[in-house]
Image: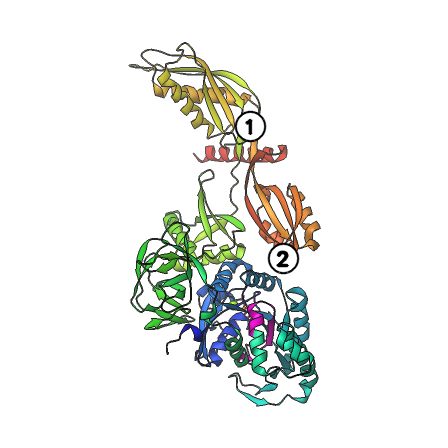
Amino acid sequence: MREYKGSEIRNIAVVGHGASGKTSLVDALAFVSGSSKRHGSVKDGTALTDTAAEEVERGYSINLGCAYAEWQDTKINLLDTPGYLDFQGDAVAGLAAADGALCVVPATAGVEVGTERMFKEAMRRRDPVLFVVSMMDKEHADFDRIYQQIKTRLTNKVIPIEIPIGQGADFHGIVNLFTKRAHVYKRGVKTGEYEETDIPAEAQDQFDHYYNELIESISATDDTLLERYLEGGDISREEAIAGMKEAMKKMELFPLFCVSGELNYGTQAVLSMIVELMPNAYEMEELHAFKGAEGDTTVEIHADDNGSCAAHVFKTMSEPHVGEVTFFRLYSGVINNGDELYNATRSGVEKLNHLSIAQGKERTEIAKLHAGDIGCVAKLRNTHTNDTLSTRLHPVRLPLIELPEGQISMAVHATNRADEEKLQQGLHRLHDEDPTLEMHYNPETHETIVSGLGERHLEVNMSKLKRKFGVTAELSKPRIAYRETIKGKAEGQGKHKKQSGGRGQFGDCWVRFGPQPRGAGYAFIDEIVGGAIPRQFIPAVDRGIQEAAVRGIIAGYPLVDFRVEIFDGSFHTVDSNEMSFKMAGIQAFKAVAAKCKPVLLEPLDELEIFTPDDYMGDVLGDLSSRRGHILGTEPAEGATLIRAVVPQAELHGYAASIQSMTHGRAYYRRHFKGYDEAPHEVAAKVIEEHAKEKEEELVAH
Ligand SMILES: Nc1nc2c(ncn2[C@@H]2O[C@H](COP(=O)(O)OP(=O)(O)OP(=O)(O)O)[C@@H](O)[C@H]2O)c(=O)[nH]1
Ligand SMILES: [Mg+2]
């Protein structure tokens, strides 16, 4: 392959809802350009960018996939992104690495939640977007209907620049409104061969209608063109294209195409339009990177071969036998095969042996990568998603990709206890390649908790654990970290005395227990006067009480938010020691705490739910059935923001439930809020479960 400069490169993220035909389209585009030798298919598990075992098995994309098409002296990098919301992290990363998006909308299912979300994300990034109506060959395909849907649900600035000839089983060509020429495809041939003709009679009316709309739209974005249009003058193809490109940059126009990835109809036209309408890699807006390994002074990064090297890692993937493969976008400078770069994020040097570009899972070694291009390299030592590679002389850190936050949490454990360490290592590696998968250990419940974007996300990662790291692991409902506290006051004695030949043990204390405000924690107050207990033994009483408090009073959960005053006691000059007073503290806890009206505390989360207004009633009703307390509602980003506090115990399965309630339109953020007293019935159940567990333990021993 020849070298490509930034001006000859287009970086395009292919986005859309799940099963909209993105992977099939990327395969067809790479194939029809001649850059990929075979027309693969998702159904057969041979698609260019669905290569992981989990993807082949399930028939949908899980990871960001990189491919390219060389077309009209241009290298088009195609980033195939997963459509399911569970894998949205990679879709967001794909958009971040690209300069524009191809938004795929299927000709039957139309605009769905994933389409809305990715279009919104592209708008947030201010990326130009090309819409493609895919699967035009499918029964009930309806180009006009999808066009109207995009118009009403995504943007009224969408404008067809290509229309289909026939649709569904009769789809056999396209008319380009710029060239006024038609591509008519040979039936039964999937190589993309077509005959170029005048506009066929059957498409003439459609053409007239859409042509006027197109020219009107373009003129409306440019004053000189508008003047000419109003005076009845002609607008040339070149002017129309230039006008359109400018309008796309400002997000004033979004062109619409139609294709069938499966039949390979309309695909060359998409490639040509990407070359003509999408910004080249030199046209990117400058980025502001942080200088050095720390601090917040910034430096501008321009796409320039002569600039200092700055590359951003947008994806890593580890495969058995290959190791970790790192995908990066080179924003500035050039990289030669074998160069040493500096990872400023982690302060480490990396040698880029076997610098490559990827066509699906095939990697081709190249001598040099120019500013603006996307490359990959295997076996870096310590470089992960979101890191920046630059040079020791000019270390920089590029802005981080803002990845979506975890939505669901589950407990995970290795089926085979001996694999527990392998499980931890495997989870860390999976987190490195997909930061939206997170894990932590909860010391209160002694569980490892994994969180991710959905059930499917966690389930797929369990498969990855097995295949890549040989660990079979199981997910379960996480235990709730209840706590206990007291509401009343009481006082009493804790005495420890042992006389067993030789030196004995003696410790004796009098204490008062009382409640503290919620969240105030534990306090130990020394009110001993006159040396009833020698100073050095008092902290031992404190330790004994704290040790006993961890095991709680009523249900085995730690006791919190209480105060203890030690006000009297006695000692023995020979037999008293620290150990004895610690034991006295434990005894005091046992004697007094239970008399102070102990209650169960449950953890609460605060939820911020963004839902379309239509579903607000359902969402609110569901929250109250989960014992939720609504803090308020307010309009936000064309939806409603509901704030509520809900007990964690009621939130298991919430992600799936809100998805189905709102057809995937709502999303939420969740964070720990604090503890509050559990209602009587809830507490009674937890206490009963604890008693049962204790009984079972007794029987077991
Ligand atoms: N008839 C027809 N079917 C298609 C076409 N393109 C894709 N399909 C089928 O639609 C299904 C989904 O296609 P994919 O290419 O995997 O869709 P995707 O958008 O990549 O899906 P995700 O990876 O889940 O986001 C597959 O079964 C394809 O075979 C098309 O042009 N015509
Ligand atoms: Mg796919």
As drawn, 182 above or below 291 = below
Secondary element under disc 2, as helix, strand or loop, is loop
Q: Amino acid at mark 2?
A: Arg
Residue 213 image-quadrant placement? bottom right
Q: 559 and 390: which one is in front? A: 390
Residue that sits furthest to the top in the current view: 530
Q: Which residues are magenta?
A: 245-267
Which numbered circle lies on residue 517?
1
As drawn, 599 above or below 213 = above
Q: Amino acid at mark 1?
A: Pro
Residue 67 image-quadrant placement? bottom left
From this viewpoint, is residue 210 visible?
no
Q: Horizontal placement of 199 versus 26: left or right?
A: right
From this viewpoint, is residue 120 visible?
yes
In percent of width and height, residue 408 lies at 53, 50
Q: Horizontal placement of 231 versus 33: left or right?
A: right
Q: 261 and 202: which one is in front? A: 202
Residue receiving disc 2: 665
> Which residue: 55% across, 22% down?
596
Which numbered circle lies on residue 42?
none
In percent of width and height, residue 446 lies at 44, 40
Q: 374 and 112: which one is in front? A: 374
Instruction: Pick the quarter of the image with the N terminus.
Output: bottom left
Q: Residues within 10 Å of mark 2 (few under 14, many from 20)?
A: some
In percent of width and height, residue 36 lies at 44, 78
Q: Confirm whether the magenta stretch covers residue 341.
A: no
